[in-house]
Amino acid sequence: MDRISFGKAVNLGYSDLEDMEYIGKIGGYEVYRQDYDYGDYVGTAFDVIDPNVVRGKRQPTYKRVMEIELAQEYSKAWHVNISRVDKKYQGEGLSFRIYRFLLSKIPGFVLQAGTSQSPGGAYIWYKLSQFKDVLIYGRTKAGRPAMMIPNDELREMQCYNPSKDAYDSDKEFYMFAMKCA
């Protein structure tokens, strides 16, 4: 995985929730899902909205707090293409809470980290590892499993085997999260 950084804060605007399925509520926010299929590329988008911030009365739109785009390209795991939080809602730990919500709410859901991660993204995976019902594991491009352990100093995950590096390596490496019993 490559390390990346994001610059400018983002304003996610409003959503009319058209063609979106209600998944559930977390805190004061609502989570909606929309699936799409482009043949060899299957994806899903999640919108997290603040139902208390509404624009319009006849055709209301709701404030988008967070958006997540996931894809299933090479495996059954859902790869994080992008995850963004509106600038007014940053700092609430929302990404971590939503990932954990999805892992517990959708049976058999396996989340795959993006191939590039910001420090905030790496920290989300570190936080997920702190829960006994979430398993974080890695795989090399060849499919060899790699046990992952939290690095408390860097606040990110690292391979138990020091010869495998999850970050800053020339070799492709994949990290997954799933709910365990």
Image (tube, rainbow, N blue to C red):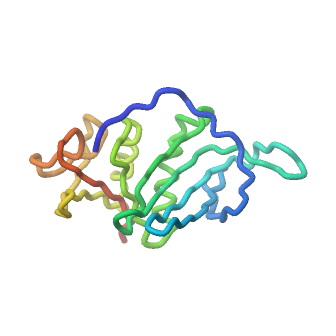
Q: Residue furthest right?
A: 58
Would residue 18 be found to the left or right of residue 149 on screen? right
> Residue drawn at (63%, 39%), measured in percent from left and top?
12
Residue 16 percent coordinates (x, y): 75, 52
Residue 61 percent coordinates (x, y): 77, 48
Q: Which residue lies furthest to the left in this view?
A: 163
Q: Residue furthest top?
A: 8
> Residue drawn at (36%, 41%), measured in percent from left and top?
117
Which quadrant of the figure has residue 71? Answer: bottom left
Would residue 147 be found to the left or right of residue 16 on screen? left
Q: Which of 105 and 152 is in front in this view?
A: 105
Question: Quarter holding the N terminus?
Answer: top left
> Residue drawn at (55%, 29%), measured in percent from left and top?
9
Would residue 181 be found to the left or right of residue 87 on screen? left
Residue 108 percent coordinates (x, y): 42, 72
> Residue drawn at (34%, 64%), measured in percent from left and top?
74
